[in-house]
Image (cartoon, rainbow, N blue to C red):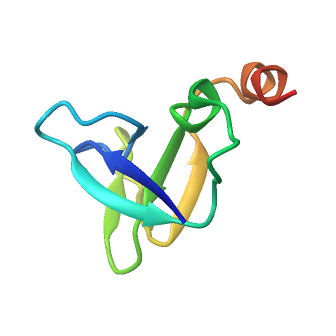
Amino acid sequence: MLKLYLDSNYMCHLTNSGTYRTYYTDFFDENTPEEYIEGFRLVPPNEVWTRSDGVKFNGLMVTCAVNSDGLERVKR
């Protein structure tokens, strides 16, 4: 299980800025590149993320938050 940190917009981080909350997940593992993980948004179960256009997404949701082609290159 990987420990990561979520900011107020549910973006994933591997280091805590002091304002992020801790979250544990099996979606990533410790061999996943940092640049890949930090390109994702993870909404925990029973929480809601609202996109800038007002559309709401109910957790559990893990999705690319940046260009997915770039993330695939990083992972390889």
Quadrant placement of the N terminus? bottom right
Coordinates of residue 76 in the picture (x, y in percent): 88, 27
Coordinates of residue 50 in the picture (x, y in percent): 33, 53
Q: In the displayed structure, does residue 28 sit left or right of residue 1?
A: right
- Does residue 12 lie above or below 25 as drawn? above
Pick the front one: 1 or 45: 1
Coordinates of residue 62 in the picture (x, y in percent): 57, 57
Q: In the displayed structure, does residue 17 sit left or right of residue 2?
A: left
- Does residue 6 lie above or below 38 as drawn? below
- Number of labels in the image equals 0
Pick the front one: 69 or 3: 3
- Does residue 41 lie above or below 34 as drawn? below
Pick the front one: 6 or 47: 6
Location of residue 20 (image quadrant): top left
* Residue in view at x 64 percent, y 31 percent: 36
* Residue in view at x 48 percent, y 46 percent: 41
Q: In the displayed orientation, state which residue is furthest to the left.
A: 18
* Residue in view at x 60 percent, y 49 percent: 63
* Residue in view at x 27 percent, y 56 percent: 22
Q: In the displayed structure, does residue 73 sit left or right of residue 22?
A: right
Location of residue 35 (image quadrant): top right
Q: In the displayed orientation, state which residue is furthest to the bottom.
A: 46
